[in-house]
Image: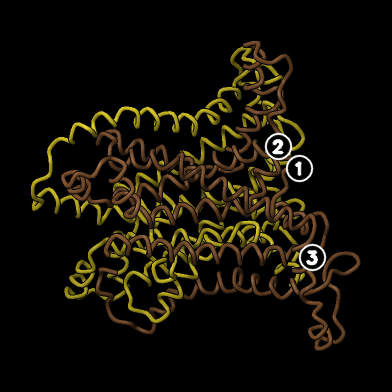
Amino acid sequence: MRAAPRGSGKAAYALLLPSWLLLGLFLLAPLAIMTVESGGRRALYGGLAPIDDLGAYLRSGAFAANYARSFSGLYLKIGWRSLWMAATTTALCLVIGFPVAYYLALRAPRRWKGLLLGLAVVPFWTSFLLRTYAWMFLLRSEGLLNQALLGLGLVSRPLPLLYNELAVAAGLVYGELPFMILPLYAALEKLDRSLLDAAADLGAGRLARLRRVTLPLAAPGIAAGVVLVFIPSLGQFVVSDLLGGARGMLLGNLVQNQFAVARNQPFGAALAVELTAAVLLLLWAAGRWSRHGGEELLS
Amino acid sequence: MSAMRSSGAPDDASLPGGIRDGAASGSGARESAARSSGAPIRPARPPKGRLRAGLPLASYSALVYAFLYAPIAVLAVFSFNSGRQTAVWEGFTLEWYRRLLADPLLLAAVRNSLLVAAIATAVATVAGTATGFGLARYELRGRQATGTLLLLPLIVPEVVLGAALLTFFAALALRLSLATVVIAHVVFSVSYVAIVVRARLAGSDPALEEAARDLGAGPWETFRRVTLPLALPGIAAGALLAATLSLDDYVITSFVAGPGSTTLPLHIYSMLKVGVTPEVNAVSTLLLAVTVLLIVLAQRLLRRAA
């Protein structure tokens, strides 16, 4: 913080109070309660089954039953598929988005830059639901893509473009791409061009400059972009529900399902805790990696 | 600027674009000024190799932009299509928009959404502004912890946040209603306001406030006549973003909304689960138009503030 904060009047703590109250009561407490419930058992008609003897319950290891269940059979399969899907989405966004961010930060003509940046920001904030619907509209069998293919005589009957993993992947990449481009741009924008010029003067080719100068300096942006894309992809349920149908189920759908349909709240809670743990692990790794990426250059 | 650095996570770049943009532009302007005044020899023109490399890169970027915007554009264009089967252009009509106005369920959802957005935005703006101000201007213990707390709603996956809130409301035996929706929306928008306001104030000169105090203004008067006007663009931008998020949210709302508290995104979702109709295109186009307007406004405020 640049500003020399003035004083530390006790009254100033009151400024932080509303946020602590709101987030403590409606974020930390709910997360804590959900974590506790994840060790419970579902009652016959939904809700939580009462536990008579807590000591015995804990000793029996029954509190881990939901977690054990989540690592079995179909659930494990959905978990892997979600990880795989999120990883694929993240990789595709990185590959597709990097050149755009590079262009925006280092090559775009000055007078276009503001507009181009604005155009990248707008999808960042617009409704994910509507942007997913736009794909549904394009891909369904009476959709524009199929109509075009039919019209051109390339196919004789509509292709099943919707309700498969490819559609989910396309929808995810489409939805998450801005979340990759912007942090990459932010990192590349700070890049000192004279370093590139120096590398060129020292005889580094284009690839060498990219690999040894641009990429290490973009490491924090890459880490941030990976986090920003991977987290929502992993917990996604709108895209998989609308574009994947029943076959495209991901972890997010599974959690939602346990709460809304199966009414197995404890199991849903366990899945949600696992999802959160995965996200925190990723954050930690990304933080480490981005610092490391920076250090590599200094040494 | 970077609340995340302390938490060991990647730093400010991970803030959503608008915020980061606004937060960075303060120091960015300063940097470029320094560069142009004192900066030594920088080639006035890029080396030839770069110029040649520029065209494919520009065309590629144009393609990606087309990829980002074409589906939305198609959606919007077909909301004016008179054909009911929606994939062949049959002529211009406003019929679908007219029908929206005659749909009482939809209008009720719009009313709910506006009500929720208004209350949630107001609460989030007041709380977030106070927090952003406190973090930017006071050396408080727990500043790092507060920064981390504010990032939590942005880090926790939406499904988890929704599930946790639902569990919480169920544990308290609270009935799901518009009130629970408002609470959920405040939770995810208060951070945005706090982060934007904090960034805005961090980029402004505290000497102005010191001067006001030296001239005899009390703390309240200093805040009202110096700090508040300084922070106002940030506050307004934060409020607009909060409103956008509230109007758009589907995932979290779907967990905490009860019967009778259907918001617009929930209504749209149930519409398109039933089937794709031109009415869905029309209502989607309207919602998109409103949110894009709010975002552009917020962006302008942040940019002018810089």
Foreground pick, A15 / A158: A158
Color of chain B here?
yellow
Residue found at x 65% / y 36%: A167
Q: How is the image coloured?
A: by chain
Q: Chain of mark 3?
A: A
Q: Amino acid at mark 2?
A: Asn
Q: Residues within 10 Å of mark 2 (few under 14, many from 20)?
A: some
Cα separation between marks 3 and 1: 21 Å
**On screen, residue B256 above or below A214:** below
Q: Which residue is mark 2?
A: A164
Q: Which residue is mark 1?
A: A247
Q: Residue B20 placed where, x, y %?
A: 37, 54
Q: Residue A272 placed where, x, y %?
A: 68, 63
Cα separation between marks 1 and 2: 7 Å
Cα separation between marks 2 and 3: 26 Å
Which sits earlier in the primary sequence, circle 2 or circle 3?
Answer: 3
Q: Chain of mark 1?
A: A
Color of chain A here?
brown
Residue found at x 68% / y 45%: B266
Q: Residue B175 placed where, x, y %?
A: 76, 63
Which sits earlier in the primary sequence, circle 3 or circle 1?
Answer: 3
Q: Quadrant of residue A168?
A: top right
Foreground pick, A263 / B241: A263
Q: Residues within 10 Å of mark 1 (few under 14, many from 20)?
A: few
